[in-house]
Amino acid sequence: MLEIGKYAMVTLTYDLRIDNENGEMVEQATETKPLQFLYGAGTMLPKFESHLAGLHEGEPFSIHLSKNDAYGEVNHEAVVELPKHVFLVNDKFDDELIKVGNTVPMMSSNGQRLNGLVLDVNEETVKMDFNHPLAGEDLFFAGKVLEVREASDEEVAQILSGGGGCGCGSGSSCGTGCDDESCSPGDSGGGCGCGC
């Protein structure tokens, strides 16, 4: 029976809670909508992956990650004010998209995808928080390994080139912040859950 190791395709379920097994539920991957990823491809949080190493199909797991092993402390420098012109599309500002409480997909000048939470909108600027939504939180995952199989060469090539493998536990650096001139609204790629 294949065990979880480098370049195995892993399918699993999990309940993700804040702090411990009795904490607030944040996200679920179910048997009908499981998480699937290529182990060792760098798409998951390193400590999340390391706790799964060696597990086989059908095995349960529980993983506690401190905030330092998850999404880190809240970075106050990732809360920025951007000029409103950054958000213009065809010379128009979308009041429905760019409003307080919305999460907006953005792209930095170097092509990095970021998600920003709109905190405030005024005449000249938009205040956004680029911290990961789970920054500052300890995380608890409990789940079960549904399948472990060898990844095809095509799957490995696609995922390593940035074509997939995203979900809770993802190590994507969404909370790095940006400066006034380096961000623009962009396509988030969709469906990435709390990890991207």
Image (cartoon, rainbow, N blue to C red):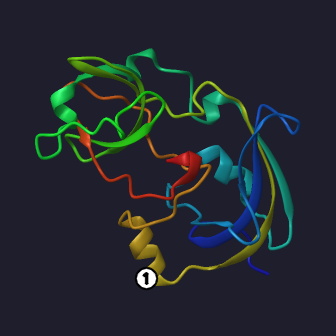
30 or 177, which is in the foreground?
30
Q: Residue at x 80, y 71 (%)?
A: 56
Q: Quadrant of residue 143?
A: bottom right
Judged left or right of residue 184, residue 44 is: right
185 w.r.t. 156: above or below: above
Q: Furthest-front residue in view?
A: 96
Judged left or right of residue 180, residue 63 is: right
104 or 61, which is in the foreground?
104
The residue beneath circle 1 is 154
As shown in the figure, which amino acid type bears the numbered disc 1? Glu
Residue 127 appears at what percent x and percent y?
Answer: 35, 21
88 or 151, which is in the foreground?
88
Q: Badge 1: few (under 14), some or many (20 or more) residues near its Cα, within 10 Å? A: few
Q: Residue at x 78, y 31 (%)?
A: 19
Residue 43 appears at what percent x and percent y?
Answer: 51, 55
Residue 104 appears at what percent x and percent y?
Answer: 38, 40
